[in-house]
Amino acid sequence: MKKLLSLMLMSLLCVTAVAETVTFTFNTVAGIEQLGIAYPTLGNGTNLDGTYTLGGVTMSFTNGGTPTRIWNSLDGPDLRVYKNGGSLTFTADETITSIVFTSANNSIGNLTPSSGELTEGTWTGSATSVTFTAGETTRINTIDVTYGGSTPPQPQTVATPVITFNPAHPYEGDEATCTITCETEGVNIMYALNDGNFQQYSEPFTLTETTTVKAKALLSTPTATDPVESEVAEKTLTFDPTVANISELTKLAHNTYFKMTGEAVVVYVNGGYLYIKDDTGYTLIYNSTLTGIAAGNTISNLKGKVNIYKNLFEVTNATYEFETTEIAVEPIAMTIPNITAENMNQYVVIKGVTLSDVSGRNIKLNDVDGNQFPGYSQNFCNFPEDLEKTYDVTGFVAVFNTTVQIYPVSFDEAVVAEPVITVDPDFGEYLGVQTVHVTVENMPEGAVIVYNFVAEEPTRDGEWQEYDDATGIVVDKSGLLTIALNDATGEEITSIEGEYIITPDFTGIEAISGKAVAGVRYYNVAGVASDKAFDGVNIVMTTYTDGTQCVTKVVK
């Protein structure tokens, strides 16, 4: 009985499926009508419509510049397929192994198959569907399609293993887990680290430094002497840098993931723009999605990726923690000529500028010296309507390609501080000659200090002179001193004036008698004594070093 079953099994294994051939005929009335196509009269055609099936084969088509059709000419009918899109497709449930075309004008060479080879009108290959596209007009009489028979066994394939790291971006000092999987069941996975030998993979393993992992899968089959091997997968795990502060952060390269250990203060928040600073610098966190954070808050445990967009340094993919604090950050006062790309992302104020060249989101800032600086609106604020006024512009320095510009945060109408003139010593009464020095606070650019002194006795009209701080103004007599501040055109900006009362000082000098003076006392008409002269009549008592005295009368 066992022997009979074995013979039956062998017989079944030796059976080979019989191939079949169907013929599509387009040059006879019977062949055309067999396909359900209306036979055209001489000089006319019938366009194909739908699909056509014989046996286990179905023929479909597409139209070219002219519809695919049966055309009846003096040579008799045939199937015509035209260029610019015309094609025929043959589909079967079983494998098509041969298609033979006949043609009245040997035009089959105009067809291009989607697979297999077409040689002298005969296509050979192995497919369940094949399409022939016409490069030129092709005339076909008959088509023999052979299909069925044994399908050659397909070779066993093994999927390439997948290497996964968790976390995908570990930081220096952390560790990550490597897991290797394969879609093909029953495989034996081997892996290698860096340039090492392959070893058996059994479970996820830990990595603590930058490592390249390679993996392959092997599948043993009953019909193969050696296991079927997959392609080798390769993936590198990089441990990203840890930085202490913003200065170290801004030195990292584009697309570098990082972790920052130091804290930073939030300078400004608007939409997805978050500017932060610490004692070492400023940076921008772009596309920040954390809500509830505000200027003055403190952030920590910052992680993200460096993105250098058009030369602008920014942090993306950021995560961080924040604490509600109220740390005020004041902008850095800068002038237009001093702003460079080195100031990128700094919070600055440019004072006393006018505005011009408003175009869309662009604007120009102009200082008193004619320097211009570009501004670009990130919709942090609106441009002022009045461009005639002078403004203090606060914002963040940005870079776009080679252009250094400012993202304005506010336009505040500039308050111009009035210049203030002071003199030292101040106006008043003094003993002896005085040298007066002039100081001007908030002195405008290009302004000049001038003065005019008019003495009481002898009477004289002073002349305006330019002030020189190296020598000051020598006041040797009582009189009126006027100090004026003029602009570059000579127009007066502001001025002050006051009197100096100067009493001659004889102390330490030789009198007319040739004696040295030891001291001077002043007495008014009421007999009150003073070291300084009184207004009106003074009795001056001069004491000499030899003990003698001299009394004179002086009117102040």
Image (cartoon, rainbow, N blue to C red):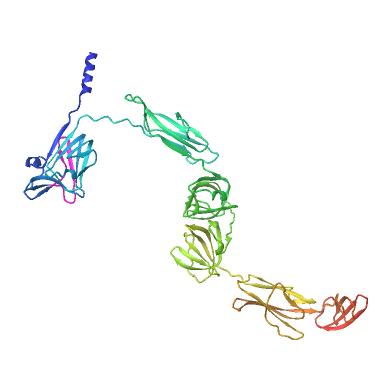
- Is any atom of residue 526 visible in this view? no
Q: Look at the image and say whether residue 12 sits in the magenta stretch.
A: no
Look at the image and give the residue range highlighted in magenta. 47-69
Q: Residue at x 30, y 30 (%)?
A: 155
Q: Quadrant of the N terminus?
A: top left
Q: Is residue 531 above or below residue 195?
A: below
Q: Is residue 33 above or below residue 520?
A: above
Q: Residue at x 78, y 79 (%)?
A: 502
Q: Residue at x 46, y 55 (%)?
A: 310
The picture places residue 485, in percent across and down from the top left corner, at 64, 76
Q: Nearer the viewer, residue 246 or 84?
A: 84
The picture places residue 33, in percent across and down from the top left corner, at 9, 41
Q: Residue at x 7, y 42 (%)?
A: 29
Image position of 219 (left or right of 368): left
Q: Quadrant of residue 51 in the image? A: top left
Q: Tell which residue pokes out farthest to the right in this image.
A: 547
- Is any atom of residue 142 visible in this view? yes
Q: Tell which residue pokes out farthest to the bottom in this image.
A: 459
Q: Quadrant of residue 512 in the image? A: bottom right
Q: Is residue 180 above or below residue 268?
A: above
The picture places residue 140, in percent across and down from the top left corner, at 13, 43
Q: Quadrant of residue 513 in the image? A: bottom right
The picture places residue 535, in percent across and down from the top left corner, at 80, 81
Q: Is residue 219 above or below residue 536?
A: above
Q: How many marks?
A: 0
Q: Quadrant of the C terminus?
A: bottom right
Q: Look at the image and say whether residue 59 sits in the magenta stretch.
A: yes
